[in-house]
């Protein structure tokens, strides 16, 4: 299975998927840490996080999958939602909270 | 070679018609940008950020480690600055 198929399988099989550097407990990048904290603040605990540092193919593949060159990336119900900046903005205006409970 | 905030600003301006671009960041890898463009009208946040990433092209994958983005349409920018 190539990286694109692997990513498609991950984001469609799980309602909420966060691609990040490190893990929610031990994030390896400030932006990934912010993304995990936002999900926690939204009360989402049962999401799937994928550590791209442990999977080089996914690390590169995820950049072309949604035509988005940076990590973290949040997917809800298979749809790309945004990176850390967009997550923060959507959290601040309440949109993210509305999207998440239905999914998680 | 280390990128300066000024260079990142020029790259964005070359690739996207902007009313206003501000870039900060002194370490050569992490930058913060505010971009105001009429091209953003009618687009969602993901599409707006993708336009900025497209303007930066491969630099986004190679030289720039992180770019924190805030994008505004000219109308939204005017109301922010009221």
Image (tube, rainbow, N blue to C red):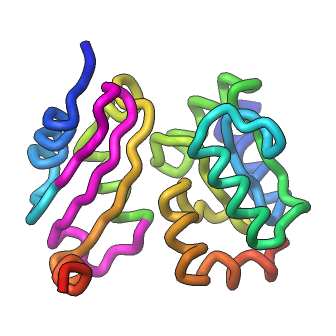
Q: Is residue B34 rendered magenta in the image? A: yes
**Residue in front for this viewpoint, A93 or A104:** A93
Residue drawn at point x = 26 percent, y = 40 percent:
B56
Residue furthest right as drawn: A46
Residue drawn at point x = 64 percent, y = 44 percent:
A32
Note whether B1 is above or below B11 in the view shown.
above
User: Where does the image place residue B74, in percent across and percent down from the top left?
Assistant: 16, 77
Left or right: residue B61 compared with residue B34: right
Note whether A68 is above or below A92 in the view shown.
above
User: Where does the image place residue B32, in percent across and percent down from the top left?
Assistant: 33, 47
**Residue in front for this viewpoint, A101 or B81:** B81
- Magenta residues (range): B22-45
User: Where does the image place residue A53, in percent across and percent down from the top left?
Assistant: 69, 26
Residue drawn at point x = 36 percent, y = 35 percent:
B60
Image quarter hosting the N terminus of chain A: top right
Q: Is residue A92 rendered magenta in the image? A: no
Note whether A94 is above or below A8 in the view shown.
below
Image quarter hosting the C terminus of chain A: bottom right
């Amino acid at each position: 299975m190539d990286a694109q198929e692997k990513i498609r399988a991950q984001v469609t099989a799980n309602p909420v998927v966060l691609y990040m550097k490190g893990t929610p407990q031990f994030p390896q990048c400030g932006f990934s840490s912010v993304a995990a904290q936002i999900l926690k603040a939204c009360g989402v605990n049962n999401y799937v996080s994928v550590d791209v540092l442990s999977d080089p193919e996914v690390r590169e593949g995820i950049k072309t999958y949604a035509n988005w060159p940076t990590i973290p990336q949040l997917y809800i119900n298979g749809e790309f939602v945004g990176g850390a900046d967009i997550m923060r903005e959507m959290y601040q205006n309440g949109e993210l909270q509305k999207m998440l409970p239905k999914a998680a | 070679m280390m990128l300066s905030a000024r260079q990142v600003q020029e790259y964005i301006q070359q690739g996207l018609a902007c009313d206003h671009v501000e870039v900060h960041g002194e370490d050569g890898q992490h930058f913060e940008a505010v971009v105001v463009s009429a091209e953003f009208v009618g687009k969602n946040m993901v599409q707006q950020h993708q336009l900025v990433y497209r303007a930066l092209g491969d630099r986004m994958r190679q030289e720039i480690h992180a770019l924190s983005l805030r994008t505004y349409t000219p109308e939204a920018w005017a109301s922010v600055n009221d």
